Image (spheres, grey):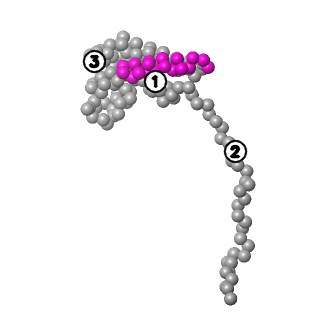
Amino acid sequence: MPELESNPNPNPSPAPSSSTAPEPAKPKHARSPINQAWIQELSDDGEVVRSALKPAYTPVFEKGDLPAAKLTVLANDIAAAQKLAAQVAQSTTGKQDTTQTEVASMDKLIGLLKSVQKRAKQKYKANAGIRAEFKLAADRAMQ
C-alpha cells in the first residue's frame, strides 16, 4: 500500500498571483544634447584659469611662457565655450553645428589648460593648497 505524505502545514498560503499591479513607470529624463561631463570640465577649467590669473600667481606663469594676456584669452575661450553650450541646450535647430564648434573649442581649451597645469605642477610641487586651486592632486610627485 502506498504511503501518503504528511503535510506539516495543512493550510499553506496561496501562491502569489501574477496579476499584481505593475510598478508605476519611472519618469523619463530628457537627455541633454551635449555631454554634461564637458560642461563640468569647462567650469573646472574656468576655476583653474581664474586661479592662474590671481596676482600672486601670474609671475609664475609669466616665467613659464604663459603671460596674463594668454591666460585672459584662455578665460575668454572658456566663457565662449560655455556660452555655446548654453546655446546648444536652448536651441532646437543647428545643434550639430554648434556642438561641433564646441568640440573644437574644447579640444583647444584642453591643450591650453594642460600648459597651465603643467606650469603649476612645476612650480608648486609640495604646496597642496595651491595645487588644489589648479585641480592637481596634492600627493602626486612630479613625473
Which residue is tagged 2?
Answer: 24
Q: What's drawn in magenta, residue-wise? A: 92-113
Q: Residue at x 33, y 19 (%)?
A: 57
Is residue 134 inside the magenta stretch?
Answer: no
Q: Residue 96 occupies which quadrant of the picture?
A: top right
| Residue 89 in which image quadrant | top right
Distance of label 3 from label 1 (alpha carbons): 23 Å
Residue 87 percent across, percent down from the top left: 56, 18
**Visible in this render: residue 55?**
yes
Q: Is residue 1 above or below residue 143?
A: below
| 1 and 2 marks in contact (CB < 8 Å) | no
Instruction: Using the image as rendered, state which of residue 129 and residue 20 is in the foreground.
Output: 20
Nearer to us of marks 3 and 2 is 2
**Which mark is in front, 1 or 2?**
2
Q: Which residue is at a point 25% across and 32% down the rendered structure image?
A: 143
- Residue pointed to by mark 1: 42
Q: Mark 2 is on which residue type?
A: Pro
Residue that numbered label 3 is attached to? 64
Mark 1 neighbour class, 10 Å CA radius: few under 14, some 14 to 19, many 20 or more: many
